[in-house]
Each structure stands twice: as structure tokens, then as C-alpha cells.
Amino acid sequence: MSIADFAGAVVSPPSQPLSRALVLEAAIRVADRGGVESITMRRVAQELGVEAMSLYHHVPNKDAVLDGVVDMVFDAIRLPAPGGDDWREAIRARACSAREVLSRHSWALGLMDSRRNPGLATLRHHNAVLGVLREAGFTLPMAAHAISLIDSYVGGFVLQESNLPVMTPDDVEEVAGNILEHLPADELPYLAEIIVDHAMRPGYDYASEFLYGLDLILDALEARRG
């Protein structure tokens, strides 16, 4: 079962024997609703309709649960195919997939690089990204720079996007209109300009900024490749 499948699953007692995978899936559902701090053995057990002590047959402690959910999040991000002719497209697709997954599970942002015992899916993911860059001719230092830059951009964008007070074009129009109504345009002309001539234009979608910024990063990396 993928993260997308179980993210909206109905909470009910397990219809199959308890397993490590079921425990981790339940922990992700708990975090999706209440953030990573809500992951406790008691709450995960409640999610599964079992006693907390029964979880310890499958995960030794909370740290193991956190390691496991991070690995499942990494596993949900599409791996770039090695040996392709277009490194940019491979890395671009991987970054878009990472943004999509992390937008559903933004609580994982502060957790993904904090674990000391990464799982196999996490290691495979990093190896695949590194492999695409190295096979494309990036030096080892440049490949490390590229991964750090792209991951920082994806994570930062998801974090910013998850905290925006707008989600749809209608939201943008409402919020921007309210700001504009009380904005002293003579004192803040550039802010008024971007609201009127950019944010409130038909079809504007803040989400499109992601690809624009990502392509700028890929352009810069291509210029320094090798």
C-alpha cells in the first residue's frame, strides 16, 4: 500500500494481523492530522484499535517508528532512473515528486535529515539521485552541492507553501483584495504593483513559482556541470 492509499484510510481495527508496515502506516496517518509531535505509541495504538503494548512486538520504541515513517516517505518519492540521457529531466521529475509527497506530509520536513539510522529506501533514494548527477558528469563536490541546493529549495518551498493563507486563485483574490483595500499605494507603490499586476491577474497560481525557481537552479547547475 502506498502513502497515497493509506493517507485517507478510515480508522478501524486492523482486519489483518498487526505488522511493522501497519504500525508505520498508522503513525503517518496520526502525523498527517497532528504533526510529528503527535506520534506516540499510545496514539498509534489507538489509530489501529489495539493496546499500545502490542506495538512493541513490531517496533522496539518510538525512535524506530520515526525512522520507519521517514523511510516510507522517502519510498513514496519517485526515484530518478539511472543512466538516462537527460539528467535535468530526471532531477526535475524527482524534485516535483518530492514536493508532491512532502506537501501531503509536511511534518516530515524537519524529520527526514535528522535520523541516525536511515532505512534502505532512504539510502536507495540518495544513491539514485547521486548516481544521476555523477553519470551526467558532475564532479563529486558539485554533485553534493547540487543535492544540498535542490533539497533545500524543495523543502523551503513546501514549508512556505504550507503556511500560506491562500490555497486557490479565489483565495488569492480575496486575500490580495483585502490587503489592497487598506494599502497606502502612494507609500508602497511596488507592493501595490505586484498585487494588482501580478497576483491578481487571471490565472495566477503561486504553485507555478516552484517550477520557475527549480528551472533556474537546474540552469545554474548545468552551467557548472563538470
Image (tube, rainbow, N blue to C red):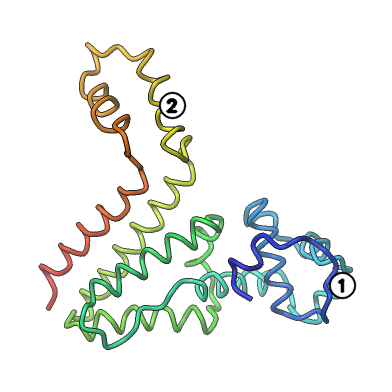
Residue occupying image coordinates x 50% and y 66%: 112
**In the rendered image of this protein, does residue 175 appear above or below residue 52?**
above
**In the rendered image of this protein, does residue 175 appear above or below residue 12?**
above
Camera-side residue: 147 or 105?
105
Camera-side residue: 100 or 37?
100
Q: Amino acid at mark 1?
A: Met
* Crowd around label 1: few <14 · some 14–19 · many ≥20 (10 Å): few
**Which quadrant is the N terminus positioned in?**
bottom right
Camera-side residue: 191 or 117?
191
**In the rendered image of this protein, does residue 97 appear above or below residue 16?**
above
Secondary structure found at label 1: helix
**Alpha carbon distance from label 2 to label 1:** 48 Å
Residue occupying image coordinates x 34% and y 69%: 93
**Contact (CB < 8 A) between labels 2 and 1?**
no
Residue for badge 1? 53
Residue occupying image coordinates x 20% and y 74%: 142
Camera-side residue: 170 or 115?
170
Give the image quarter of residue 87.
Answer: bottom left
Q: Is residue 162 left or right of residue 131?
A: right
Residue for badge 2? 175
Residue 33 percent coordinates (x, y): 67, 52
Task: Kindly give the residue lying farthest to the front in the view shown.
Answer: 202
Q: Amino acid at mark 2?
A: Val
